[in-house]
Amino acid sequence: MVNEAKCVGCGACQRACPKNILTVRTMSERLLHFNEEDDALAPCRQTCPAEIDIPTYISQIAAGDYEGAIHTLRERNPLILSCGRVCPHPCENYCRRG
């Protein structure tokens, strides 16, 4: 069994497998399933444990609308500071822009 969290995509396990049952997926192949969603949410938004609208939040900060950004966060998460300290931030792992 391959631990996907530790996989670096080198393909060594695929080459070493005598039964030829392993295949290595690239990062782009891992992200393809995000495009299958009907509502086409951004990958960061789909993986956010708090389900925060991250693209809207970032665009509000870029526009200088800090009050709007805080409102966007509080729509889904009333404990912004507490959750921000313990969040494992899976959105960053699937971000296509940063």
Image: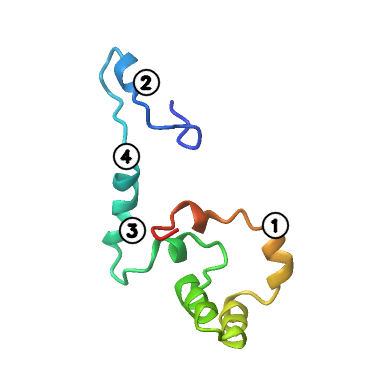
In the rendered structure, the answer to whether residue 62 lies left or right of residue 13 reads: right
Q: Nearer the viewer, mark 2 or mark 4?
A: 4
Identified by mark 1, the residue type is Val
Quickly name the residue at label 3: 34
The quadrant of the picture occupied by the C terminus is: bottom left
Instruction: Pick whichever of labels 3 and 1 is earlier in the sequence.
Output: 3
Instruction: Pick whichever of labels 1 and 4 is earlier in the sequence.
Output: 4
Q: CA distance from mark 1 to mark 4?
A: 29 Å
Residue 26 bears which disc, if any?
4
Residue at image location 49% in from the left, 71% down from the top: 54
Quickly name the residue at label 1: 86
User: Which secondary structure, mark 2?
Assistant: helix
Quickly name the residue at label 2: 13
Q: CA distance from mark 2 to mark 4?
A: 14 Å
> Crowding near pointer 4: few (<14 within 10 Å), some, many (20+)?
few
Above or below 15: residue 60: below
Identified by mark 4, the residue type is Thr
> Crowding near pointer 3: few (<14 within 10 Å), some, many (20+)?
some
Residue at image location 52% in from the left, 62% down from the top: 48
| Residue 58: percent from left, percent from top | 50, 73
Q: CA distance from mark 2 to mark 3?
A: 26 Å
Instruction: Pick whichever of labels 3 and 4 is earlier in the sequence.
Output: 4
| Residue 61: percent from left, percent from top | 55, 78
Residue at image location 45% in from the left, 62% down from the top: 44
Above or below 50: residue 73: below
Residue at image location 34% in from the left, 46% down from the top: 30
User: Which secondary structure, mark 4?
Assistant: loop
User: Which secondary structure, mark 3?
Assistant: helix
Q: CA distance from mark 3 to mark 4?
A: 14 Å
Q: CA distance from mark 1 to mark 2?
A: 34 Å
> Crowding near pointer 2: few (<14 within 10 Å), some, many (20+)?
some
